[in-house]
Amino acid sequence: MRLDDIRKKFLKYFKDQKHILVTSSSLIPQNDPTVLLTTAGMQQFKPYFTGERDSMIDFKTRRFASVQKCFRTSDINEVGDLDHLTFFEMLGNFSVGDYFKKEAIGYAWVFLTKEIKLGPERLWATYFNGQGRNSKRAKITSDKESLKFWQKFLPKNRICGFGEEANFWGPPGKTGPCGPCTEIHYDLTKKPCEKGEDCLPNCECGRFVEIWNLVLMQYEKTAEAEFVELPRKNIDTGMGLERLAMVINQKGNVFQTDAFSEIIKSIESDPRFGSTGNIAEDAKRLRIVADHFKGTVFLRADEVRFSNKEQGYILRRIFRRACDQYLHPGMDFQKVFQVIISQLKNAYPELAEKKFEIISDCEKEYLNYEKVRNLNISVLLKQLPAQGILSQIASPEGPSSIRITGQAAFQLFSTYGASIDQLKQKGFSFDEMEFEAEMEKHREVSRAGADSKFGGHGLNSAILTDEDRKKITRLHTATHLLQKALIETLGDSIQQEGSDISPERLRFDFKFPTKLTFAQIAKVETIVNEKIEQDLKVSFEEMAIDEALKSGALAFFKEKYPPKVKVYSIGDYSKEICAGPHVASTKELGYFKILSEKSVSAGIRRIKASLD
């Protein structure tokens, strides 16, 4: 069964069970400060689970299903084995205070055994046995209900209880919705390892593969690491499409399914990929390239740009790591990208729409990385302090053997972008745990910077002071005035491409083909300040998304909006779909000043502005 067929079967089945089908959200999370990338299907429904958007849900929209693009870096070093990936697709069904454990387990069993006809004798289930989880504010005990419901479908010896590490899910970040989970595992061999009767799901022998995780979302983890009861009980499930395809088609690993088979052929056909003579090593290299190039295409299609920060750092890391697998200079990555896009353009049309932009940007990044790959040892060593070099042994037959500290290795990475693989190829050795510790420090700095932003990063960070929150709220309202003033000055073709707000300034990206003139900038600035001076009232009303759009409310079309939305109006001047926050009237904003206006990519302009 091909991936396209599995996607269709899954969505049709849950549509028949009265679920609303929701398209995948971006890999860049919207208004979620806890993660850099979308790691699970539940993330776009998070406001529903926490009750934040409770008033926007009517009874008919409490069940959802989706096929979500996901990206995880937690297993990046495992990519190349049988089933670990960075980019993958997640099939999921969700209930917001509607059905719970009994129905979720029943739906999963019917889909697996009736719809896609997996053998029931190969299915096992696990549940949370209560070990390892407790809280001052919520007592979390063994999930005996799930055990009871599974006994309707499975014999007791194929239902196993595990502690928090295996059967308590989330949250995906430091805070958020979470709960015990019950997982469905597939028995690949039906043959126990040397553990005998102790060879159960989660055994590392390779006998079992987890295919579906049903999260019984009852709690929210707070910033104080406490677990409190959510306003309602929810269901959040996730099933990796690639793993399911592997099981359905009885393949030895996910890379033998149609998710990767053609991609791998296109890599193998490039003579510059080369062979080490070690079959296992070459197979791992192929899988790394296939996974990382696929992730590159999807990240770049979702407007992630190559950089050394946040999402851009992840994009750069996986693209360059893929490049490192090629043994000879040059590579035909465009051919591989064409295969990826051709295979997935029907499910994800944005890939075809942005094909040339994706390839062009990756070509530039590759040329930049080639400069790093061509740097000689002497140049790199000059960047290191003497204490960073632990030992050095010259070798006339190959690369010198140079032992450096993990901190020194990270310095070469941060200065030149030289990856771990690239440094090893040049003869460097170092403690990779030290390197990762330096990397984590770098990530913490990035997270701290991210937490200070509003655009996509929320107001609830503990890093922000009350005064910062007030500044961000004022700037957010000013952004609405700015967008309307741009439309009034430059025409109705103006379309928002993104925004970002810190306590010091706002940033607004929009489509426009040419540089703004001094007169146009002055006009926009004047209009905004006039509206501020008029002391316009800021108000909102809730309505259906279709009604909101028909009313003329502006929308950020990259965002996936819920069935019901808030529409904020600033007097009779501006009307926009938004979740807030906002001031009560424009008089609170102060004086609006445009700080800069520039191009950020072809056809996209960026304005930065502040309030005094």
Image: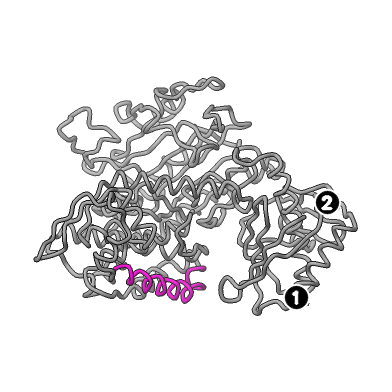
- Magenta highlight: main SS: helix
- Looking at the image, which is closer to me, 141 or 578? 578
Q: Is residue 237 left or right of residue 166?
A: right
Relative vertical location of residue 127 with respect to residue 171 in this rendering, above or below: above
Regarding mark 1 in the picture, which secondary structure is present there? helix
- Looking at the image, which is closer to me, 17 or 377? 377
User: Is disc 2 surrounded by few (<14), some (14 to 19) or many (20+) residues within 10 Å?
Assistant: some
- Looking at the image, which is closer to me, 60 or 400? 400
Q: Is residue 536 magenta?
A: no
Q: Is residue 13 visible?
A: no
Report the residue marked by disc 2.
538
Q: How many labels does the image show?
A: 2
Residue 175 locus on image (x, y percent): 53, 37
Q: Which residue is drawn at 61% across and 32% down?
A: 232
Q: Looking at the picture, which amino acid does disc 2 mark?
A: Val
Residue 493 locus on image (x, y percent): 71, 74
Regarding mark 2 in the picture, which secondary structure is present there? strand
Q: Give the range drawn in magenta.
A: 350-373
Residue that sits furthest to the right in the current view = 534
Residue 82 locus on image (x, y percent): 26, 51
Q: Are marks 1 and 2 in contact (CB under 8 Å)?
A: no
Report the residue marked by disc 1.
490
Q: In this view, does 66 lie to the left or right of 499?
A: left
